[in-house]
Amino acid sequence: MMFKETKLLEKQMDNFLDIISESVLVFQEGLRRYFKKQADDFESSLNKVDVLENRADDLRRDIENRLYTETLIPESRGDVLGLLENMDKLVNGAKHVLKEFSIEIPFIPVEYHEEFLELANAAGRGVEEVVQAARRFLSDPLSVKTNLHKVYHYEEEADSIAEKIKRKVFRSELELAQKNHIRHFIINMDALADKAEDVADRLAIYTIKRSI
């Protein structure tokens, strides 16, 4: 265990990763509520992910402060700090998508709802796999390979779904402005899967460094 020097720091990292996982679940539920036209419940999801983002930021700063002030794991500090910073972007990404829905209130025809939810699911599964990879990295760095492979799989799946929706949208009879508006939301959702892939790439490098 990388944090065997302190149980508190180990617990803080676990809590931080729990928040990442929960934020994606809230993001997915928020989209379902949006498509069901449950406006109040949707706003509740946005508020919840906002709270989670603030909690993640507070935890990240506290962990970073303790890593420096208590001179913990000096040989791996840079990797852990980089991991924290990039994992935090996953919560920010989930919140950004819901906030954009809340602000712009896009009209997305019902025939695209299922595929939007499929895209959210693929992105969410990619995030969950990278969370599991991060947990493994902190306890057994050489065991992360399987999870990283799954992150890449779900990122490719998200890209494929996003392309499929865009092709359908731009071959439809919708006005060009609406097509572009829908594309904006597809890109933002797909970006969440890309962020998970970015973290996976970093974890792959950190793992190689730890194996040398």
Image (cartoon, rainbow, N blue to C red):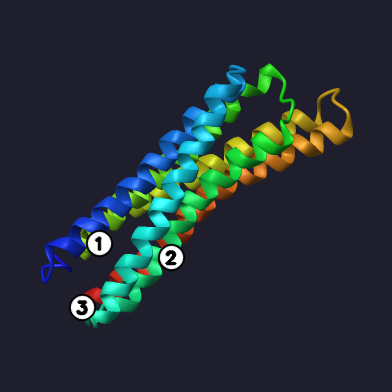
Mark 2 surroundings: few (<14), some (14-19) or many (≥20) residues within 10 A: some
For residue 108, side relative to residue 172 (left or right) = left
For residue 173, side relative to residue 88 (left or right) = right
Could you tell me which residue is drawn at 44 percent across and 57 percent down?
88
Residue 72 shows which numbered tag? 3
SS under mark 1? helix
Could you tell me which residue is drawn at 54 percent across and 44 percent down?
95
Q: Is residue 203 above or below residue 95?
A: below
Pick the quarter of the image with the N terminus: bottom left
The kind of residue tagged 2 is: Glu
Q: Position of residue 100 (x, y in %)?
A: 66, 41
SS under mark 3? loop
- The residues tagged by marks 3 and 1 sit, at their Cα atoms, a distance apart of 17 Å
SS under mark 2? helix
Question: Which residue is labeled 1 in the image?
Answer: 137
- The residues tagged by marks 2 and 3 sit, at their Cα atoms, a distance apart of 18 Å
Q: Is residue 69 above or below residue 150?
A: below
